[in-house]
Amino acid sequence: MSIAAVLIVKNEQDHLRACLQTLAWVDEIVVVDAGSTDGTLAIARDFTDKVAVEDDWQGFGRQRRRAEALVESDWILMVDADERVTPALRESLQAAVAQNSPAIYTLPRLSWCFGGFIRHSGWYPDRVARLYPRGRAGYNDALVHEKLENPEELPVRPLEGDLLHYTYRDLRHYLEKSAHYAQAWAEQRAARGKRGSLAAGIGHGIGCFLRMYLLKAGFLDGRQGLLLALLSAHSTFAKYADLWVRTRTSPPPEGGTRDR
């Protein structure tokens, strides 16, 4: 049975080549670009002629669905540019496809963040559903935090071997991505008529820190674990704060000034 590696990308020249080098064994590579302005497209075309540009961004889920529609192989392996397939994982993937037993397979993801691999904090094993038979499962169209849907209720099975995840270049990169996800999350919730509060943001933020650092043993990840717990708490609060600003605050007065 054939397998396709599928990626959605934008401005990933720093990651893409290393990622695609770990995917040279697949039968097909499909890359959908969201309008890169760096060398991403040139790198992608070094590995495959199946490169499409879809720069009218409609969210992560919709972009993944566009990529799925270009696949001709029997199986889809969804990968992000900042991920790497290890040799052990490759063997597991090939064995699963060779069995040709319709199922959704989860991969254990090991993340590198702020100078070290994170093996606690609720980050590992961060199992993600990424291998599935084409046409029998697929992503929803969520703007952010998209999900792989399983309409046929196929069995879900775990694979061995780590999918390495190189998450953030530095603190600025973390904060930029966090702000982007917070904005998309708040937009999605507001569109559904949900409202936020600062109290909810504080409560969820504190809960996030306690869960990651204590319950999930983030303290075993050393200083990286402490930093991640603090940043995650901040990101959680920011989501609810953004929703509160969108739904419970008033627009500025006409002309931008107000009589004293």
Image (cartoon, rainbow, N blue to C red):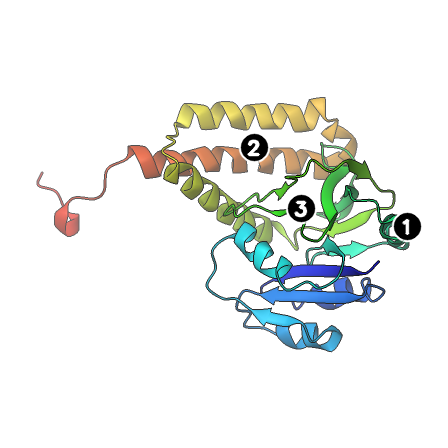
The circle drawn on residue 137 is 3
Q: Secondary structure at mark 2?
A: helix
Quarter of the rendering containing residue 65: bottom right
Task: Tell me if I can see residue 12 in this picture.
Answer: no
Q: In the orientation shown, which residue stands out farthest toward the left?
A: 259
**Mark 2 → mark 1, Cα distance in angstroms:** 40 Å
The quadrant of the image that shows the C terminus is top left
The mark total stands at 3
Instruction: Please state if 195 lies on the left or on the right of 260 as rendered.
Output: right
Q: Residue at x 34, y 39 (%)?
A: 246
Tell me which numbered mark, 2 or 1, is placed earlier along the sequence: 1
State the residue position of label 2: 233
Q: Is residue 200 above or below residue 156?
A: above
State the residue position of label 1: 95
**Mark 3 → mark 1, Cα distance in angstroms:** 20 Å
Q: Name the spot of residue 158 as percent of width and height, x first.
A: 82, 38
Instruction: Please state if 96 lies on the left or on the right of 5 as rendered.
Output: right
Mark 3 burial class by Cα count in 10 Å: few <14, some 14-19, many 20+: many
Task: Look at the numbered discs 3 and 1 and tell me whether their residues touch, using CB distance below 8 Å.
Answer: no
In the image, what residue type sits under mark 2? Ala
Q: Is residue 214 above or below residue 31?
A: above
Q: Secondary structure at mark 1?
A: helix
Q: Of 117 and 164, which appears nearest the observer?
A: 164
Mark 2 burial class by Cα count in 10 Å: few <14, some 14-19, many 20+: many
Tell me which numbered mark, 3 or 2, is placed earlier along the sequence: 3
Quarter of the rendering containing residue 110: top right
